[in-house]
Image (cartoon, rainbow, N blue to C red):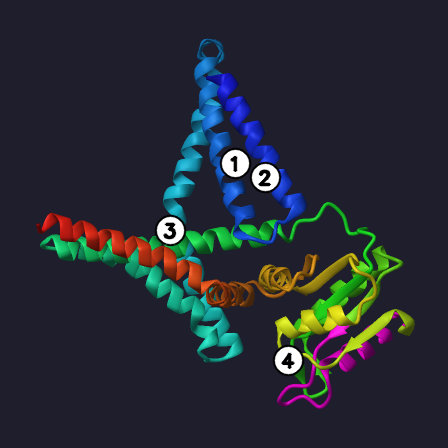
Amino acid sequence: MLEIMSGATLTLLIIFGAVMLREPRSLWSGVLFFILVLDLAVFSVVIAAVYSSWLSEHEIVIWLLLALTLIAGLLVLAFPLFLLVMFIVEGVKIVRREGLSPSNLLSLIFAALWFGFIFIWPVVGTMQQGTLGLILYVIVSFSAVYILALMAMFVLSALLNLMHLGRRRRLDYIVVLGAGLDGSRITPLLAARIDRGIQLLRYNPKARLILSGGQGPGEDLPEGEAMAAYAIERGVEPGRVIIERESVNTEENLRFSRRLMEGRRPRIAIVTTAYHVFRSLILAKHQGIRCIGFGARTKWYFTLNAALREFAGYLSLTRKKHIAVLGIFAMLMLILYGLTTI
């Protein structure tokens, strides 16, 4: 048994490593990491069973393992409530500090839906009468769990794509994505992105900095020009700065910036706010642009709310395949209902 588990764990490690090295810009990175963690947990149990005789002679080790197991169990049980409280608290913060708007209500909306799912929806299930009502309840429940699982894998994959062993990547180009201007003023959010790009530029002496962003409503000039002036003021050599001034969204940021690069396969890094990195990498992947992503930090309450918006953007981008999965499940359940009524 131990040999089988060892082989399975080693295989998973190799597959996960290959995905992270070759193409981490998909949910497979998060899914494989999650499976690997579960495998390691089972492997630990198997090891404990195999060496039970040795453990019986070392009570302190047994108590330590029991304590760790108890802590892990309590954390798992408390996580739904922790998530609820966190989204409520941070949702209130963003409304108080950033104002009341539909986008700023995402954290509170999610908290309300999460509360309903863990406390009210199970009660609704006990009220179902008849096969059709039960099947419809199962379809809705599966859809909710499916979306929540996607969200969990999205967050996990996003975190994995933010992790890098070093900043000296022999980069050729560092693309900083725009985030809007206040008239002609660089906002704190955009300044954090540019500062992160400048930091990477110092670690990659041969790289050039592409500052990407067009002119939007309420802006006095293209973002790329304002970003370039900001970078030069902070010591970046003008000869290492390239301005992209036509794009109006992330997809165009990437496409128009790629046109400004030389070489067939340049080494590219995308710099944006941390919560925005993963979806930017997915958009780059769809355009055939090979790159890695680096994230600039921002306030936690803003990050949490924006992460929900990013996930909604991901769902919109990949909606066809997820609608297909949910549609097939619903069809199978309705066919099952039809068979039960014959």
The type of residue carrying mark 4 is Val
8 left or right, relative to 141: right
Q: Is residue 127 visible?
A: no
The boundaries of the magenta stretch are 211-237
Compute the Cα span from label 2 to label 1. 8 Å
The type of residue carrying mark 3 is Pro
N-terminal label among 2 and 1: 2
The image position of residue 238, as x and y in percent, is 90, 74
Residue 191 covered by magenta stretch: no
In the drawing, what numbered circle is on residue 80? 3
Q: Secondary structure at mark 4?
A: loop
Return the residue at label 2: 16
Compute the Cα span from label 1 to label 3. 23 Å
The type of residue carrying mark 1 is Leu
Return the residue at label 4: 248
Q: Secondary structure at mark 2?
A: helix
Q: Secondary structure at mark 3?
A: helix
N-terminal label among 4 and 2: 2
The type of residue carrying mark 2 is Phe
Compute the Cα span from label 1 to label 4. 40 Å
Compute the Cα span from label 4 to label 2. 36 Å
Do the residues under discs 2 and 1 have CB atoms within 8 angstroms? yes
- Categorize mark 4 by other alpha carbons within 10 Å: few (<14), some (14-19), many (20+): some
Q: Please state which of residues 268 and 100 is positioned toward the viewer in this rendering.
A: 268
The image position of residue 246, as x and y in percent, is 71, 82
